[in-house]
Image (spheres, rainbow, N blue to C red):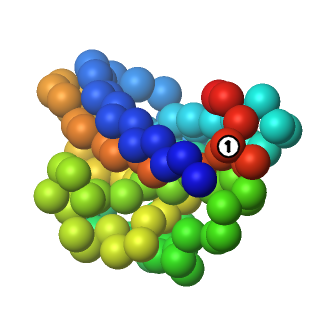
């Protein structure tokens, strides 16, 4: 079983709208075996560094067994333990006028150890 950890930097200087958050972006991830998922991330004034149910964030159950595609935001290496076992959505505090860097961490498990 291969686990990939991806770190994304989000550079914003006024971005588009989407979902329920002030700024929301889809991130489509897939592997060569046909597994895939869409994660959502962005900014909202009501967001915290934890699970924000008002923005559709919810903690996921433990990782599925190997051979099953799974992608989720986690906080293990970026010091965000409030994300628990992960979430498909990760919004942070800010709005359309935010300018700066926001760090997100993703754990990715491919189907049958396939390539991305």
Q: Residue 28 location, x and y as percent?
A: 65, 35
Q: Determine which quarter of the picture holds residue 113.
A: top right
Nearest to the observer: residue 29 or residue 49: 29
Q: Residue 37 location, x and y as percent?
A: 70, 47
The residue shown at (29%, 52%) is: 92
Q: Residue 14 location, x and y as percent?
A: 33, 23
Q: Determine which quarter of the picture holds residue 75.
A: bottom left
- The single residue placed furthest to the bottom in the displayed view is 61
The residue shown at (25%, 39%) is: 103
Residue 32 shown left or right of residue 11 in the figure:
right
> Does the rendering let one see residue 106?
yes
- The single residue placed furthest to the right in the displayed view is 34
Residue 67 shown left or right of residue 102 in the figure:
right
Is 47 placed above or below 37 here? below
Quadrant in which the C terminus is drawn: top right
Q: Residue 32 location, x and y as percent?
A: 78, 30
Nearest to the observer: residue 75 or residue 33: 33
The residue shown at (37%, 58%) is: 74
Q: Name the residue under label 1.
A: 113
Q: What element carries label 1?
A: helix
């Amino acid at each position: 079983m291969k686990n990939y950890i991806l770190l994304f930097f989000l550079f914003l200087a006024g971005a588009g709208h989407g979902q329920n958050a002030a700024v929301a972006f889809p991130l489509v991830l897939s592997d060569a075996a046909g597994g895939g998922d869409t994660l959502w991330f962005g900014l909202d004034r009501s967001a915290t560094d934890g699970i924000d149910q008002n923005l559709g964030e919810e903690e996921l159950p433990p990782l599925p067994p190997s051979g099953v595609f799974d992608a989720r935001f986690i906080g293990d290496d970026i010091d965000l333990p409030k994300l628990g076992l992960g979430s498909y959505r990760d919004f942070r505090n800010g709005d359309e006028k935010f300018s700066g860097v926001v760090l997100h961490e993703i754990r990715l498990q491919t189907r049958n150890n396939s390539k991305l």
